Amino acid sequence: MKKIEHLGIAVRDIDKGIDLYEKLLGTPCYKRETVETEGVVTAFFRTGESKVELLQGLNETSPITRFIEKKGEGIHHIAFAVENIHAEIDRLKREGFELINDVPKEGADNKLIAFLHPRSTNGVLVEICMDRDDL
Ligand code: ZN
């Protein structure tokens, strides 16, 4: 894996989250994007080579809403950039990791993404991602 692409942080209120993280990071949010299929609104910040992604659930059945109900706001996932997401999914399966997505799906920020189940990664929800343009 190439680098930590971004950290995903679950927030109850994306507007308040944007205000807070603009102050914290000293940099403006450069993109706000709704991903209907995932039931989330996202907001992105650049911090050097990596990014911060804020996520707010769009409705009660959104995985982000359920996450916040169970655990409260906070770090939701860690995303690693990979060269070739298909090859990486195959490699991780061979290594015994449990993939939530066997087939990559479209995520925010022009990415193809797949998640690993926290059961197989010491309780951490891990995302792997690559730019859709790199396919
Ligand atoms: Zn993410």
Image: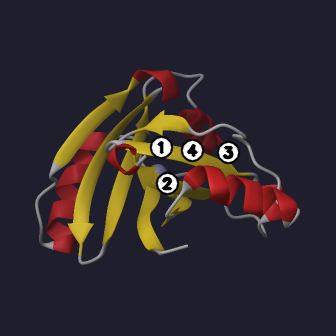
Q: Is residue 117 left or right of residue 52?
A: right
Q: How many marks?
A: 4
Judge whether 76 appears above or below 16 on screen. Answer: below
Q: Quadrant of residue 12?
A: top left
Indicate the position of residue 45 as horizontal and vertical percent values.
Answer: 23, 60
Residue tagged by mark 4?
A: 68
State the separation of the CA atoms marked 2 and 4.
Answer: 23 Å
Q: Is residue 68 left or right of residue 4?
A: right
Q: Tag 2, which secondary structure?
A: strand
Residue tagged by mark 2?
A: 129
Q: Quadrant of residue 46?
A: bottom left
Q: Tag 3, which secondary structure?
A: helix
Residue tagged by mark 3?
A: 70
* Badge 4 or badge 1: first in the primary sequence: 4
Which labelled disc corresponds to residue 22?
none
Which tag is nearer the camera, tag 2 or tag 3? Answer: 2
* Badge 2 or badge 4: first in the primary sequence: 4
Q: Residues within 10 Å of mark 2 (few under 14, many from 20)?
A: many
State the separation of the CA atoms marked 4 and 1.
Answer: 24 Å
What kind of residue is marked 1?
Leu
* Badge 3 or badge 1: first in the primary sequence: 3
Q: Is residue 117 left or right of residue 115?
A: right
Q: Residues within 10 Å of mark 3 (few under 14, many from 20)?
A: few
- Say if mark 2 contacts mark 1, CB within 8 Å: yes
Residue tagged by mark 1?
A: 112
Residue occupying the point 24% across, 78% down: 48
Indicate the position of residue 20 as horizontal and vertical percent values.
Answer: 22, 60
Indicate the position of residue 53 as horizontal and vertical percent values.
Answer: 36, 54
Of the pair 72 and 112, the residue shown nearer to us: 112
